[in-house]
Image (cartoon, helix red, strand yellow):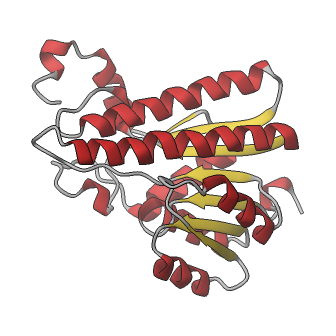
Amino acid sequence: MSPETQIKKIIIVGATSGIGRKMAELYAAAGNIVGITGRRKKLLDEIENMFPGKIKTECFDVTGNENIERLNSLIQKIGGLDILVYSSGIGVLSKEVDWEIDKLTVDTNVYGFIEITNWAFNYFSRQGHGSMAVISSIGANRGNSWVPAYSASKAFQSNYFEALAIKAKRIKKDIGIICIEPGFVDTKMVEGYKRFWVVPLDKAAKQIIAGIEKKKQKVYVSKRWWLIARLMRLAPFWLYKKFG
């Protein structure tokens, strides 16, 4: 069996819906062993029953204090770990600067994210190989007045993964560090936005999996969102503020 077709052990954090769930389904359908996490046990059980023997679950909230314990348990269930994907995330539109929204966003997209990915980097470093990916956002490139904590938290994720990619090369470890920056994907996460270039969920998940397989450091979904990212970064504040 070639490396491309080897059965992989994959954990997806935040896989009860959206991109995370679709990736889990595609990975399992291809014959891989997938561990999935989420807060809603009913949905986890539903997905597990769709792929008996291929999907295992752990029910927990990344804002809690059981992240590493539950991940270690999931590794035991699936028999190892080759790829970890952090797909858990929250983004809520608000006209006001709402503390409850901002706190939940940071707890999920920053604290939960960094605890798990920091642990994963060290796990793969000890193991000698592996890949880790985060579902960040095109919003990481600039601040957004409608979701200020969300855009800031996604910038944190993208910058942290860039730093880890540099560190992996510096310490000469075979660890793929893949930062995914989707544009608008057809999920509930984008409800309420003025949308364009919306990417179908299945297409988005397939492009992300392909990017992880190739160990690309940065993946835009779809690829043409690279142009929007570049325009966002280049736009002067006086112009960008009319749109952000």
Q: Quadrant of residue 131?
A: top right
Q: Is residue 237 above or below residue 92?
A: above
Q: Nearer the viewer, residue 226 or 37?
A: 37
- At x 66%, y 44%, the residue is 132
Whether residue 214 is visible to the viewer of this picture, yes or no, is no
Where is residue 226 shown, x and y percent of the image? 40, 32
Q: Nearer the viewer, residue 158 or 90?
A: 90
Where is residue 187 shown, x and y percent of the image? 33, 62
Q: Is residue 35 above or below residue 244?
A: below
- At x 30%, y 15%, the residue is 234
Q: Quadrant of residue 243?
A: top left
Q: Quadrant of the C terminus?
A: top left
- At x 28%, y 41%, the residue is 102
Where is residue 225 shown, x and y percent of the image? 37, 38
Relative side of 165 to 226, left or right: right
Q: Quadrant of the N terminus?
A: bottom right
